[in-house]
Amino acid sequence: MRPDPAPPRMAAQAIRALADEEVMQLVQKGRAEAFEVIYERHSTAAFSLAYRMCGNRAAAEDVVQEALLSIWRSGARYDRSRGSVRTWVLGIVHNRAIDSLRRTVAHDRRRASDEGIEERFEAAERTEVEAARRDEARSIRNLLQSLPPDQSRVIELAYFGGFTHTEIAEMLDTPVGTVKGRMRLGLEKMRYALTGTGMP
Amino acid sequence: MECEVCRDDLASFKVVAEALPIAVAPLAPAPELKDRIMAVVRSEADLLEAAGERADVVPEERRERRRWRIGGLSVRPAFAALAAAVLLAIGGVTGALINGGGGEPSSKTYEASFTRKVAPRASGSLVVTDNNATLSVAGMPQAPRGRVWEVWIQRGDKFEPTPALFTVNRDGRAVVAVPPRLGGAQAVLITAERRGGVQQPTQKPTVTIPLTAS
């Protein structure tokens, strides 16, 4: 029996009109042009996160390359019930960046300050979606900065620095319990600001 | 078993966990990053397509049951594959003889030559087909600290950078997709450059692959 003829290939332009979750289905089938769409939509966020964590462009590019190629090769592992493609992609980049930081012998790398980066490197706002994402990022950044400094600092060290509670406690010369408490308080405030639940 | 309260509490922080990664200032990656990643992706997509839709699907049947029957004989797939390869080779030779050997080869292999001072035991080759060029090396040292190996295409006295940057594994092995735009090129070269690559070679080539007929 002859196999069914292959379905016609979707044009690259048509793929761009699809939602992320639908594009991922094509990535899972090995469609390079679908992966290119995922790259175009999420590479700036991925690179920004990696750069924030690694502190230099070369290391950030290595992290993004490693993360995105692992996504290309394991696209079948994306489970839409567990969150958006963007969250999934950034989660993988975050994990790879932490791996990269831990591989680095000197853990005292200099991380780039957020201040001024927008002016120097900001990606072009090409679409309304990107503009909306940029606004969202800005408001979350403001939210993080609005926390008391001791709370935002432990959250940043843990999330962007990849440091453990113990390492942060040593760095700040503070008991581990205090670090955990500050982190919990900070995260609760962020949750309340984002969802309106959880805080008095 | 998970505590239900803890699970709900943890889940309630999901929105924060999803918000944190996008709180960073936006920073566009260099265009070359896309070129590098997409070169690998396209190369692998081509291979996947050539191999067929189920190429990467592990058969469910147990290994010991994987015997094929040829002419009433039960044989293992490896032997069947060997037999098929022999038959194909015989067929190919016969075909070539019948056609006077005029058919174009489907791929060309170019041998790499190494700077022996840097890579005394290395070997490698570049296999070029219509749509792909794949560079393989073995026994090659790591690039010096802070550097990666960068692949160049030489045309006359000009050196075109490619998205192909690579490191080697512990055995000094690497397989790298090279852009197949090799028409009119004299050689493919490899130099050790800073991570992220450069636009012009700053070192003498460690590897030279002359693109003359082999």
Image (cartoon, helix red, strand yellow):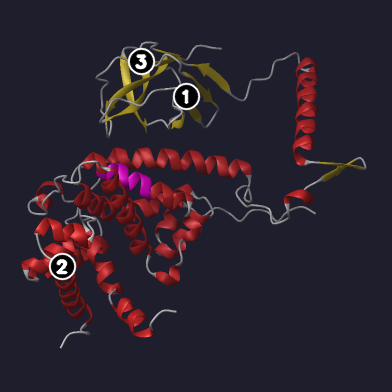
- On the image, the x and y values in percent for residue A38 come to 38, 54
Judged from this view, the residue extending furthest toward the bottom is: A200
Figure check: A132 above or below B30: below
Which label number is shown at residue A179? 2
- List the residue tagged with mark 1: B137
Q: Is residue B24 in sight in this rendering? A: no
Q: Secondary structure at mark 1?
A: strand
- On residue B99, the disc is none
Look at the picture and state if A20 lies above or below B151: below
Nearest the viewer among A134 and B170 is: B170
Within the magenta stretch, is there residue A147? no
- The quarter holding residue A86 reads bottom left
Q: Amino acid at mark 3?
A: Val
What amino acid type is highlighted by mark number 2?
Answer: Val
Task: Say which element carries label 2.
Answer: helix
Q: Are marks 1 and 3 in contact (CB under 8 Å)?
A: no
Which segment did they paint magenta?
Answer: A60-67
Question: Mark 3 — on which chain does it sit?
Answer: B
Q: Position of B89 compared to B209: left or right?
A: right
Which one is in front, B9 or A44? B9
Q: Is residue A199 above or below residue B17?
A: below
Residue at numbered disc 3: B118
Q: Quadrant of residue B8?
A: bottom left
Percent position of residue A39, x then y: 36, 51
Q: Compute the Cα span from label 1 to label 3.
A: 14 Å
In the displayed structure, A48 sits above or below B116; it is: below
User: Callout 1: residue from which chain?
Assistant: B
Q: Which is more foreground, mark 2 or mark 1?
A: 2
Distance, label 2 to label 1, CA atoms, is 49 Å
